[in-house]
Image: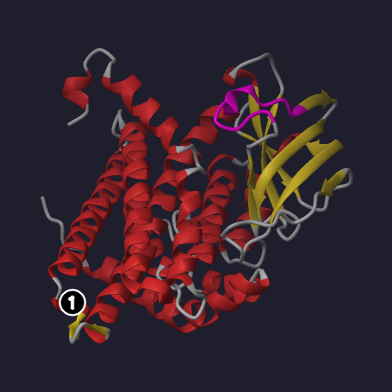
């Protein structure tokens, strides 16, 4: 068992850190304050391969492992949590299209998405189907060699500013088995977008509702076979949960570094904050929890890469632990900064706002506990989950 990164992983980590320091961190506060979606910066990330990290090489992706992806996304998140989170969502949607799309669709859209020249959104959540994703009602009716897509989605990252929508819709009966996945051009006739939501965090990416009114989708834009959509969605979310978990880790690392620096500079009662045992204990706990979260994420990624039968469980564990601990580390870092942590001159309040949603999306942490508990209580779990 070797916990050290190999040479390639270190090289990608350094590349991502350099990009984050040069192109993300200097602009993150302004993007947040002015709600700017930095499309040009996303395209620059695409030029480095960061928009197709684990998509296949034959369509321009890097073809890297999920473990490699966590290393890259963690480094990027230290520069801007919100923008990196969108990059991970784009990666998930791009992987779905390139992994399950038909040949012509992959050939047309794969290179554009992996390069970042075109951007993708993932459309699963509906007004009445959040945690209960299998109850979605958006419907795709077969009409000759096409489908007519009708329904609505909510809380869609990038909606209104992206080019391709990966949409889950019902083609069959109730339940997960009736869901099919589609790749729908974002400017197709019959699509309308709601207002841009005003959010607590994640302000460098727009979030809107989408309405589909008999949108014609060619049969060639179906991903996989009819009825396979929910399985595709869950496979995507295994990686998506690792992605959001590693965004929490990357942001928490930046928060810890800021808190450490502040504690060694700030003086109260005649000594630096770092000389007070209370602050020392806070920093020690923050560092310990951060390392634990990072290793849990990397374990989940390793299980997913290996096709382990309980990979979904480990990904849920990683998402639950890393997003809870990541938020806590950011909040403690803000506390160490005192009043300065609460003002926008410092990044701590943004770290707290941006990481809070990680405990909600890609399946709430309560749903993560449900997934873990169900598998833990299943027959043979003592041999599979250790």
**Number of marks drawn:** 1
| Front residue of 366 and 172 | 366
Task: Tell me: 95 left or right of 152.
Answer: left
- What is the quadrant of residue 212 in the picture? top right
Q: Quadrant of residue 255?
A: bottom left
Classify 10 as above or below 184.
below
362 lies above or below 120: above
From the top left corner, tell me how far across and down residue 108 is, in percent.
Answer: 69, 55
Viewer-nearest residue: 108 or 348: 348
- Residue 376: quarter of image: top left
Mark 1 burial class by Cα count in 10 Å: few <14, some 14-19, many 20+: many
Using residue 230 as the reference point, say whether residue 255 is left or right of it.
left
Q: Is residue 217 above or below residue 38?
A: above
| Residue extending furthest toward the front | 269
Check the picture and name the quadrant holding the C terminus.
Answer: top left
x and y percentages locating residue 131 in the rendered image: 55, 30
Q: Is residue 64 magenta?
A: no
State the residue at coordinates (72%, 22%).
Answer: 171
Q: In x, y percent, where is residue 198?
A: 69, 57
Residue shown at 21%/52% (left/top)?
A: 292
Q: Is residue 294 visible?
A: yes
Residue 270 position within the rendered picture, expressed as x and y whole percent measured from the top left: 18, 87
Q: Magenta part of the protein: which range? A: 128-139
Q: How is the image coloured?
A: secondary structure
Which SS type dominates the magenta stretch? loop
Q: Residue at x 39, y 57 (%)?
A: 248
Secondary structure of the residue carrying numbered label 1: helix
Q: Is residue 104 visible?
A: no
Residue located beneath label 1 in the image: 274
- 322 to 384, vertically: above or below: below
In the image, what residue occupies the spot 42% across and 70% down? 348
């Amino acid at each position: 068992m070797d916990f050290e990164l190999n040479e390639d992983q270190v090289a990608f980590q350094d590349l991502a850190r350099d990009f984050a320091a040069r192109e993300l961190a200097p602009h993150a506060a302004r993007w947040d304050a002015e709600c700017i979606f930095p499309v040009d910066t996303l395209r620059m990330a695409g030029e480095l391969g960061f928009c197709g990290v684990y998509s296949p090489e034959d369509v321009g992706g890097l073809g890297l492992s999920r473990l490699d992806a966590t290393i890259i996304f963690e480094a990027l998140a230290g520069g801007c949590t919100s923008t990196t989170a969108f990059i991970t969502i784009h990666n998930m949607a791009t992987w779905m299209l390139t992994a399950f799309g038909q040949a012509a669709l992959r050939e047309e859209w794969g290179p554009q998405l992996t390069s970042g020249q075109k951007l993708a959104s993932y459309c699963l959540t509906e007004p009445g189907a959040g945690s209960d994703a299998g109850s979605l009602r958006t419907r795709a009716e077969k009409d000759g060699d096409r489908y007519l897509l009708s329904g609505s989605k909510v809380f869609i990252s990038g909606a209104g500013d992206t080019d391709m929508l990966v949409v889950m819709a019902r083609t069959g009966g109730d339940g997960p088995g009736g869901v099919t996945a589609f790749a729908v051009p974002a400017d197709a006739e019959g699509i309308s977008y709601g207002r841009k939501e005003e959010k607590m965090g994640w302000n460098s990416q727009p979030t809107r509702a989408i309405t589909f009114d008999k949108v014609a989708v060619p049969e060639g834009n179906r991903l996989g076979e009819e009825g396979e959509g929910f399985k595709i969605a869950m496979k995507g979310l295994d990686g998506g949960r690792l992605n959001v978990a590693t965004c929490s880790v990357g942001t928490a690392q930046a928060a810890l570094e800021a808190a450490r620096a502040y504690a060694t500079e700030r003086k109260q009662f005649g000594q630096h904050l770092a000389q007070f045992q209370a602050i020392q204990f806070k920093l020690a706990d923050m560092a310990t929890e951060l390392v634990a979260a990072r290793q849990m994420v990397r374990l989940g990624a390793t299980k997913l890469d290996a096709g382990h039968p309980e990979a979904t469980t480990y990904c849920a564990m990683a998402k639950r632990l890393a997003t809870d601990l990541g938020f806590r580390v950011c909040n403690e870092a803000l506390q160490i900064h005192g009043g300065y942590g609460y003002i926008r001159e410092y990044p701590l309040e943004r770290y707290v706002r941006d990481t809070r949603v990680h405990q909600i999306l890609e399946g709430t942490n309560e749903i993560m506990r449900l997934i873990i508990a169900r598998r833990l209580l299943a027959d043979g779990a003592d041999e599979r989950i250790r």
